[in-house]
Image (spheres, rainbow, N blue to C red):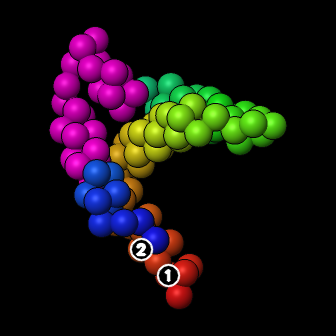
Amino acid sequence: MVCTLGRVILAELEDVLRSRRNADPAVSYTARLLADPELTQRKIMEEAFEVCLELARPETQRDQTAAEAADLLYHLMVGLVSVNVSLDEVLAVLEERNS
């Protein structure tokens, strides 16, 4: 279960990402991702792979694993925002699966 603080942080991130939709892609990395779905997809795959690499280490480096997971969450959230799938929708699916 996502703690309340975690849910708030992700909701705030979602709001920031949505606010970048009309930003200049030359100035905002998020706007650049939102303007280029293929780039977003590539970044999600890259970050997922990097998380997998961290998880497969014989001695997991907690800080590095957390950093890679944060990168993955950020890029995944950009992808979700780009197709108008909200965090609440994703959390509702997880809640339903948990019941």
The residue beneath circle 2 is 92
Q: Residue furthest bottom?
A: 99
Determine the residue positioned at 50% across, 72% down: 94
Measured as percent of width and height from the top left, residue 43 is found at 54, 29
Crowding at dot 1, Cα within 10 Å, few <14 / some 14-19 / many 20+, comes out as few
Dominant secondary structure of the residues highlighted in magenta in the image: helix
Element marked by disc 1: helix
In the figure, 36 relative to 17: above or below? Answer: above
Determine the residue positioned at 75% across, 36% down: 59
Measured as percent of width and height from the top left, residue 81 is found at 35, 46
Q: CA distance from mark 2 to mark 1?
A: 6 Å
Q: Residue furthest front?
A: 59
On residue 81, the disc is none
Give the residues drawn in magenta, as a range.
Answer: 11-34
Q: Amino acid at mark 1?
A: Glu
Q: Residue furthest right?
A: 58
Q: Amino acid at mark 2?
A: Ala
> Quick check: is 73 in the magenta stretch?
no
Q: Nearer the viewer, residue 70 or 25?
A: 70
Rendered image quadrant of residue 21: top left
Element marked by disc 2: helix
Crowding at dot 2, Cα within 10 Å, few <14 / some 14-19 / many 20+, comes out as few
Q: Nearer the viewer, residue 76 or 25?
A: 76
Measured as percent of width and height from the top left, residue 80 is found at 41, 49
> Quick check: is 19 in the magenta stretch?
yes
The residue beneath circle 1 is 96
Q: Is residue 32 visible?
A: yes
* Tag 2 and tag 1, C-beta contact below 8 Å: yes
